[in-house]
């Protein structure tokens, strides 16, 4: 059986080993926490940058949407105007057909009388 002094040396040795391992583990944990903190801060900065970019693109898309709405409105008015012009051209075509019939009728009468 070990003497009391030998047992005390074993306890002190075990305690020193525990202390060394604990100190090393705390040091590693502190280093890992520092790295995590740096990564979190970096991620936060990137998220702010992304948010600004998204807000800028949203503003640009809103501007484009308003422009497209105006263009759509303008195209609608042009289409309405073309419809009116087409109707007027149809009326003019009908009048020209009537004039052509009258001219044909007038030109054929002198031939019949001769």
Image (tube, rainbow, N blue to C red):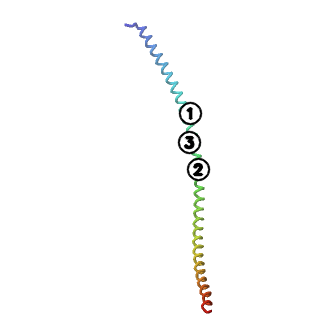
Q: Secondary structure at mark 1?
A: helix
Between the residue at mark 3 and the residue at mark 1, the CA separation in whole angstroms equals: 14 Å
Q: Secondary structure at mark 3?
A: helix
Between the residue at mark 3 and the residue at mark 2, the CA separation in whole angstroms equals: 15 Å
Contact between marks 3 and 1 (CB within 8 A): the answer is: no
Mark sitting on residue 47: 3
Foreground pick, 73 / 4: 73
Image quadrant occupied by the N terminus: top left
Image quadrant occupied by the C terminus: bottom right
User: Is tag 3's residue or tag 2's residue first in the polypeptide sequence?
Assistant: 3
Q: Is residue 56 above or below residue 95?
A: above
User: Is tag 3's residue or tag 1's residue first in the polypeptide sequence?
Assistant: 1
Foreground pick, 2 / 48: 48
Between the residue at mark 1 and the residue at mark 2, the CA separation in whole angstroms equals: 29 Å
Q: Is residue 13 above or below residue 56?
A: above
Q: Classify residue 66 by image quadrant.
A: bottom right
In the image, residue 71 lies at what x, y percent?
60, 62
Residue at the spot 62% in from the left edge and 87% down from the top edge:
107
Residue, disc 2: 57
Q: Residue furthest left?
A: 1
Q: Residues within 10 Å of mark 2 (few under 14, many from 20)?
A: few
User: Is tag 1's residue or tag 2's residue first in the polypeptide sequence?
Assistant: 1
Foreground pick, 49 / 96: 96
In the image, residue 12 lies at what x, y percent?
46, 13
Residue, disc 1: 38
Q: Secondary structure at mark 2?
A: helix
Foreground pick, 38 / 11: 38
């Amino acid at each position: 059986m070990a003497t009391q002094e030998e047992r005390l040396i074993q306890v002190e040795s075990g305690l020193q080993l525990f202390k060394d391992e604990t100190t090393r583990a705390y040091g590693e944990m502190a280093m890992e926490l520092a790295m995590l903190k740096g990564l979190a801060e970096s991620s936060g900065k990137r998220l702010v940058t992304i948010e600004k970019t998204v807000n800028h693109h949203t503003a640009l898309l809103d501007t484009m949407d308003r422009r497209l709405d105006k263009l759509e409105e303008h195209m609608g008015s042009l289409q309405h105007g073309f419809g009116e012009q087409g109707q007027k051209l149809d009326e003019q075509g009908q009048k020209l057909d009537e004039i052509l019939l009258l001219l044909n009728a007038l030109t054929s009468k002198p031939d019949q009388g001769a």
